[in-house]
Amino acid sequence: MKSVTISDVAKYAGVSKSTVSQFLNKRYEYMSEKTKQQIESAIKELGYSPNIVARSLKQKSTTTIGVIVANILHVFSTQVIRAIEDYFNENSFHVIVCNADDNPKKEKEYIKMLRAKQVDGIIVFPTGSNVELYKKLRKENYPVVFMDRLVNNVDANTVLLDNEQAVKLAVDHFVEREHEIIGMISPPLKENITPRIERTHAFKERLAHHEISINKNSIINTNINEVQDVLKKMFSNDKPPTALLALNDRVLFEVLSYSKKNNIKIPNELSIIGIDEVTFAEFYRPALTTVGQPAFAMGKKAAELLLSEIKNESTNVEKQIFRFEPTLKIRESS
Amino acid sequence: MKSVTISDVAKYAGVSKSTVSQFLNKRYEYMSEKTKQQIESAIKELGYSPNIVARSLKQKSTTTIGVIVANILHVFSTQVIRAIEDYFNENSFHVIVCNADDNPKKEKEYIKMLRAKQVDGIIVFPTGSNVELYKKLRKENYPVVFMDRLVNNVDANTVLLDNEQAVKLAVDHFVEREHEIIGMISPPLKENITPRIERTHAFKERLAHHEISINKNSIINTNINEVQDVLKKMFSNDKPPTALLALNDRVLFEVLSYSKKNNIKIPNELSIIGIDEVTFAEFYRPALTTVGQPAFAMGKKAAELLLSEIKNESTNVEKQIFRFEPTLKIRESS
DNA sequence: CTGAAAGCGCTTACAG
DNA sequence: CTGAAAGCGCTTACAG
């Protein structure tokens, strides 16, 4: 299957390649109506469609961007990607999606390959371990927007949740309901992932603010697959928490599993709030109180920032951190 | 920021572009050790990395594929994409993700643009309304794999669920539990989407097989946002169903919502099975009986098929339909 | 109003 | 063992 090129069209229409190219790029100013017609019908006859790779080579723009998430299976990432794809589709860009699995080596590989493919910019949930690479990109003025996670000393636009506020909303709500022992479960901190760090920190601070003593056995950072064991220990203690904050949806799943298995009554025996909205919050029994992130708005913002960097509208604008406000949805579990 | 090209490397290393290119493509056969060293260090010194767009233009391969789903927000699609991305990443391809929203116009636009970008192949959840376009692609021997949905008269590899079996599993289970009025809720059939059609058809057939009379008020194909109303009507009837099959996860959500709002006891008053595994099945109260699709295996299969078409290993192999087996996970809701 | 020519950054067949 | 040249399919500055 030989594909038809601009030369074929030119020959068929009896004009030069230049003129066809002018036509394709809608530069009709000096084009006679007749030429226009000829080219138009030649294109139709031959079923021609331009080779964008060739155009990209010349124009140094591929109208393609890359998005590197930790894992597309996380609902938050999926929503962010959807918002990004919508925005870029409206602007005639395509998006390449990559899963880095919080693996710095994989992330580095993806960034390199995306650049080699001359992608116009990248939105990344950074692992945080490739600081030198990020710095290099920024020094070259390559469009990069960080999502969900901060990277110190790298001057790039970053979109994330107001994590402190998210925790405040949850804790204050628990306090209002007169809980006195409030626990928290989070994935490990060691991987240096912003939301976990900021939320854990904010949690402790907020308890202090309310002058609630911190029960060491009730503030946990651990691997997802150990959450069940940790909960078991927690609830065999003297003073188990009466309220529990799940720092993200994955943790919430574990808490709900545990509660079900052990027949813990929610909210009578244990109040629960989860950060991250989940699909089943409304119709879970009981309906779940959550702190939701505006995932679509965040994705859209990241897309806008990236496109404006790509269009060079913001070369000298200082890079910023954009914090989005969470919302507490009070339902039945708290 | 001027980027460094193969010419720069050649000059720096004191050799020709050809030789550098040989080096890049690891054709070392006739290369002196010295030349190799020189090029290697030149590349390192200059921080060179090849422009893949230029390579693609020459080689007629972009090592990029496109995946067009209905909506990345559907869990099944996300899982399929993840499997595809994993497989292609191992083979050094990237994947562009597009949401067609079951909109044939959007789908057509995406297919055209992906081809214009010289993507090596496409995996698509077809809307079914662009038959002529699909045919054209196939006639040009362009690599295309269909996912989840059949398109008549288009000779392409297709990966989907054994929908008949999925329904059989559910209905037989209901019958075993001695249900006599069994209902089913599905999204509309008008859009010609394979799973809905096959499942609805299989449902009726399976009831007939068990000599269970078909209660017209209990077999529903309707828009998602009308499911609540339909259920209300259904349960205000003389003989409401005692068992309900939700044809996909979206419908299941509505059924669970309705049950919760109306305090319907599951499974005592109503048994429920949903097709599609859902994240919360295990720890819902009651845990949900589901018929799961092997989404990752299906995604992987589609990826394998596409890559083999791309590599031209299967030019003359007849295109096939690959059916995957669902699994019934009996939990508490049925 | 339109065309010839150069160039984007690679690869490859061929010559030596 | 290595290089000069042509070519992939476009765009664009310039000439006429």
Image (tube, coloured by chain):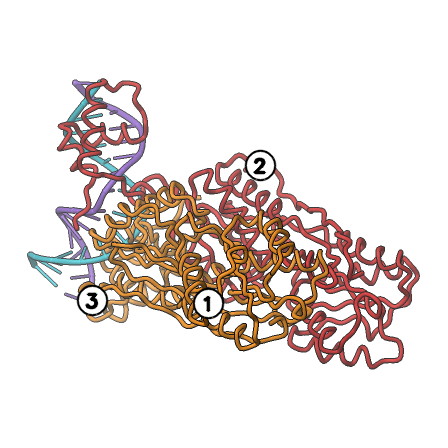
Chain colours: A orange, B red, C purple, D cyan
Q: In x, y percent, where is residue A225?
A: 58, 47
Counting residues from the N terminus, which is met first, the one under dot 3 or under dot 1?
1
Residue B237 in sight: yes
Nearer mark to the viewer, of 2 and 3: 3
Residue under the point 67% across and 51% down: B293
**Picture coordinates of residue A249 (x, y %)?**
55, 60
Quadrant in the picture for residue B215: bottom right
Q: How far apart, in angstroms, are the residues tagged by discs 2 and 3?
A: 57 Å
**Amino acid beneath label 1:** Leu
Label 3 or label 1, whichever lies nearer to me, is: 1
Depth order, front residue of A92/B243: B243
Closer to us: B139 or C3: B139
Chain of the residue on which disc 1 is drawn: A
Cα gap from disc 3 to disc 1, whole angstroms: 38 Å
Labels 1, 2: front one: 1
Q: Residue at x 47, y 38 (%)?
A: B90
**Which residue is label 3 attached to?**
A317
Which residue is tagged 2?
A: B316
Q: Amino acid at mark 2?
A: Asn
Relative to B216, say whether A231 is above or below. above
State the SS at label 1.
helix
Chain assignment, label 2: B
Residue A294 in sight in this render: no
> Is residue B110 shown left or right of residue B46?
right
Name the amino acid type tagged 3: Val
**Residue located 35% across and 39% down the image:** B59
Q: CA distance from mark 1 to mark 2?
A: 69 Å
Q: Which mark is residue A207?
A: 1
